């Protein structure tokens, strides 16, 4: 009988090693991590902003969630190419989404898994870093991200101070205000919203896009991004996706524009 140890210790041939390298390169090319992120111009403008608040008003498939996720990873890993931090590690972030089933499980977690550099996670493992009970992602450097939803009671949005907060889609104004209290007294602090304005003219528009007192909005940048600006979409995507929608729906879902609803 052959010695089973010899099978376990058999080294890979040169051709097998080259095949593994080729497979790894292919995976990285198709789904790059944080090192392979190349923002298109409007995404870069969003990342470059040094304002306390930023709002990415983007159409569907404009890459708004990707921008929000990458921004948070840059903060927690201290690899931000456009910002210098004064705060020592660890960084503490918070992501607030519409709900846990659609918003977190189906949209945000896959984005975080895609863009995370595995060596940045605890033991280089997503399983070791992701706490599904507390909905917290912890990094090897001690930084963390907690995930909340708009469905939770307002009191759930209290808690310890945070360095940054990312709202995926438009938050209720009361939840936004409660979360802002978590950013006080931080040397490095910021918030951003990535959203498509499907609810019409809301408090976001009144407060940040067309405020009655423009001086009140000095610490916030607003970026309006048409889906057509996403150079990474396959050719014909915009026409197939939005071609049959009404003019108002195209303004909302392709251009990221606020459109009055209900006769306002």
Image: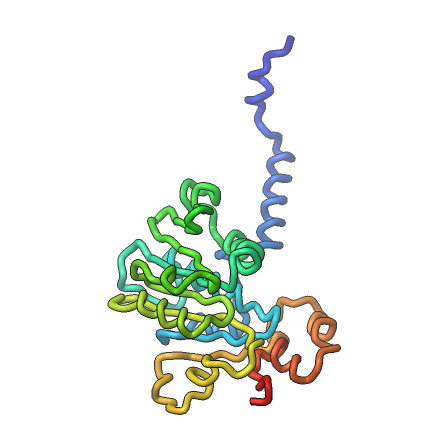
Could you tell me residue 151's position as x and y percent? 48, 62
User: What is the count of numbered marks?
Assistant: 0
Image: 197 above or below 75: below
Q: Nearer the viewer, residue 85 or 95?
A: 95
Q: Residue at x 27, y 66 (%)?
A: 186
Residue drawn where x is 29% and y is 55% of the image: 89
Query: For this rendering, which residue is in front, 215 or 198?
Result: 198
Residue 32 shows in this picture: no
Give the quadrant of the N terminus.
Answer: top right
Q: Position of residue 148 (x, y in %)?
A: 44, 59
The image quarter containing residue 160 is bottom left
Which residue sits furthest left? Answer: 185
The image position of residue 170, as x and y in percent, is: 49, 72
In this view of the protein, can residue 137 be seen by the observer? yes
Q: Position of residue 207 (x, y in %)?
A: 42, 83
Please, is residue 82 above or below residue 93 in the view?
A: below
Q: How is the image coloured?
A: rainbow
Is 100 or 113 nearer to us in this picture? 100
Q: Is residue 202 above or below residue 3?
A: below
Residue located at (58% from left, 23% from top):
10
- The quadrant in which the C terminus is found is bottom right
Residue 208 falls in image quadrant? bottom left
244, above or below 84, in the image: below
Q: Say which quarter of the image contains residue 21.
A: top right
- Asked whether, in this view, residue 263 is left or right of residue 243, the answer is left
């Amino acid at each position: 009988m052959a010695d089973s140890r010899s099978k376990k210790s058999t080294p890979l041939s040169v051709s097998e090693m080259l095949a593994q390298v080729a497979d790894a390169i292919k995976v990285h090319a198709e789904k790059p991590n944080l090192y392979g992120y190349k923002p298109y111009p409007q995404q870069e403008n969003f990342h470059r902003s040094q304002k306390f608040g930023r709002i990415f008003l983007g159409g569907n498939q404009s890459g708004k969630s990707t921008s929000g996720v990458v921004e948070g990873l840059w903060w927690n890993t201290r690899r931000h190419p456009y910002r210098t931090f004064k705060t020592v590690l660890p960084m503490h972030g918070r992501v607030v989404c519409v709900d846990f089933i659609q918003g977190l499980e189906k949209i945000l977690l896959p984005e975080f898994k895609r863009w995370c550099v595995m060596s940045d996670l605890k033991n280089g493992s997503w399983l070791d870093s992701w706490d599904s009970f507390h909905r917290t992602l912890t990094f090897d450097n001690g930084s963390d991200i907690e995930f909340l939803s708009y469905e939770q009671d307002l009191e759930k949005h209290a808690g310890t101070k945070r360095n940054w907060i990312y709202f995926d889609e438009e938050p209720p104004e009361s939840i936004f205000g409660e979360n802002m209290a978590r950013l006080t007294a931080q040397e490095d602090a910021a918030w951003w919203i990535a959203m498509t304005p499907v609810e019409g003219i809301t408090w976001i528009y009144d407060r940040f896009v067309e405020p009655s007192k423009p001086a009140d909005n000095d610490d916030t940048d607003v970026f309006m991004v048409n889906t057509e600006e996403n150079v990474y979409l396959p050719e014909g995507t915009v026409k197939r996706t939005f071609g049959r929608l009404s003019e108002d729906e195209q303004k909302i879902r392709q251009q990221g524009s606020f459109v009055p609803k209900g006769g306002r």
